[in-house]
Amino acid sequence: MKSEFLETGKIVNTHGIRGELKLQPWADSPDFLAGFDHLYIDGLPVKVLSARVHKGCVIAALEGIDDINGAMRMKNKIVSVRRSDIKLDDDKYFIADIIGLRAVDSATDEELGIVVDVLSLPAGNVYIIKGEREILVPAVSEFVIETDINAGYIKLRLIEGM
């Protein structure tokens, strides 16, 4: 079952003395995290007063946090967004939804294992599938034939040596 919220980053530090926070984004780009009106911390909504990208992180001012002491109390907290606030293209998926899917060979319908992790590498994502053996599959259309989150599987085209 899909969670209502998706973890999208972590508050790693304060920024300045006026209560701004430095967020490490867990998304494709920091711009994604900087684009929300509300973030969720400890399950509670917090209004974003301002957010900007700075050196690969997001510097955010949140409602109710207006000094360094308030900002220090937020350090190391996980930041989430509501799934319904996000619009994805049809061929895009959340990594949280990919992990746990059954991996199936498209040629034989043999179950290969379960997607246990997704490596985010400079050239693109790679799915780690654990079954009888571990298989690494680049997350590109040449190998990923079909993804059905609701049915709980991905179909893969494997090549010799995979």
Image (cartoon, rainbow, N blue to C red):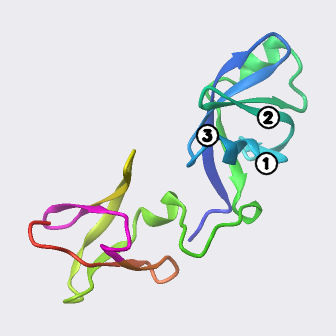
Residue drawn at 71 percent across, 66 percent down: 87
In space, the residues marked 1 and 2 are separated at their CA atoms by: 9 Å
Residue pointed to by mark 3: 9
- Nearer-the-camera pick, 92 or 75: 92
Instruction: Give the residue type at disc 3.
Output: Gly
Question: Which part of the image, by quadrant, shows the C terminus?
Answer: bottom left
Instruction: Indicate whether 26 appears above or below 68.
Output: below
Residue 136 left/right relative to 89: left
Task: Of the two numbered discs 1 and 3 on the same chain, state the one appearing first in sequence.
Answer: 3
Instruction: Give the residue type at disc 1.
Output: Phe
Badge 2 crowding class, 10 Å Cα cut-off, few under 14, some 14 to 19, many 20 or more, is: many
Report if the CB atoms under discs 1 and 3 are less than 8 Å apart.
Answer: no
Secondary structure of the residue carrying numbered label 3: strand
Q: In which quarter of the image is residue 13?
A: top right
Residue drawn at 20 percent across, 75 percent down: 158
Q: Tell me, yes or no, whether the highlighted magenta stretch contains residue 135.
A: yes
Q: In which quarter of the image is residue 67?
A: top right
Q: Position of residue 38 (x, y in %)?
A: 82, 47
Task: Of the two numbered discs 2 and 3 on the same chain, state the one appearing first in sequence.
Answer: 3
Residue drawn at 90 percent across, 33 percent down: 63
Instruction: Give the residue type at disc 2.
Output: Ala
Span colored in magenta: 129-144
